[in-house]
Amino acid sequence: MTSSERAGSFDHYVQQYAAQMDEPWADMLYQLLFAQLGQVLTPTMRSALTVGCGLGTTDRFLAEQGLAVTGTDIAPAMVEFSARQAAEAGLAITYRVQDAMTARFDQPFDLIVCHNVLEYVDLPEFVIANLATSLRSDGLLSLVLHNPTAKVLKAAVFNQDPERALALLDQREFHYELMNKSARAYTLKEAVNWLHLCGLEVVEHFGVRTLYDLIPNQPKYDPAWHQQALKMELELSKRSPFQEIAMFHHLIARKKG
């Protein structure tokens, strides 16, 4: 699949994607991710690269922490949207339309963020290898992946659909309806192996939305309930077996010196 073909759906659905960011589950996702990133950011970090920047939400968070941020995405409409949001927030973020498979940079970064990108590329291990070349020695890669185990649990518990849950047991491919995009989920073991082969060592494993997606949606719109759920999720995100069943795996990997 060419770069333009991969970009097509993301370009077309950017406004629908933006509208979904107002939903409480999107808010929960980013609050958890930012709390987890906050645990690994250090005063010595100066630069960050985001791959598949989407709407630029993570870019703006990192820029607000004082990092010089470069945001990239394969979809021009995503880059344009993110650049406008950054300008409106008064943040100086550099944006580029680039393919994660082939992107090259003049200087290495202290932090590279690659969230929910590998599911949409043909050769995810090649993306990690390419990103590793742009990471300084001892720099960190923040990698977020869909968890196939969580999809089975959600089908059985949240959707109360045991037939669908059984079908998902051995099914890796899924359809991201919001973007009308086909994708593939990978196991934690696969991701850790790719990182190891590319000279990256996992130093943190967080779960993102461990139990949240199994709970009916109705209470999620209550701000008080949301805060209680956030407290719960922050506590469970580093505890086994909860981190292993979360909707997303968040791995922090360090490039070996």
Image: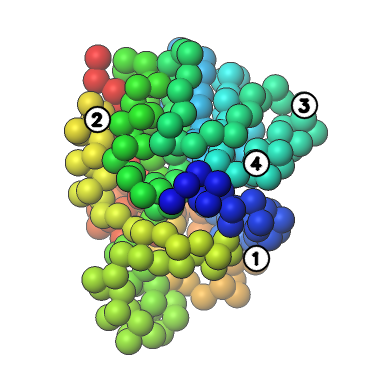
Q: Which mark is on residue 76?
A: 4
* 47 sits to left or right of 143: right
* Residue 32 in sight here: no
Q: Earlier in the sequence, mark 4 or mark 1?
A: 4
Q: Give the residue at mark 3.
A: 90
**SS label for mark 3:** loop
Give the distance between the C-alpha atoms of the residues marked 4 and 3, in whole angstroms. 21 Å
The kind of residue on which mark 3 rests is Gly
Q: Nearer the viewer, mark 4 or mark 1?
A: 4
Q: Which mark is on residue 198?
A: 2
The kind of residue on which mark 2 rests is Cys
Residue 7, horizontal then vertical, whole percent: 56, 48
Of 120 and 163, the residue lying toward us:
120
Q: Give the residue at mark 1.
A: 222
Q: How would you rate the neighbour count of disc 4 (Cα within 10 Å): few for under 14, some for 14-19, many for 20 or more?
A: many
Residue 76, horizontal then vertical, whole percent: 65, 41
**SS label for mark 1:** loop
Give the distance between the C-alpha atoms of the residues marked 3 and 1, in whole angstroms. 31 Å
Residue 108, horizontal then vertical, whole percent: 43, 16
Residue 196, horizontal then vertical, whole percent: 20, 33
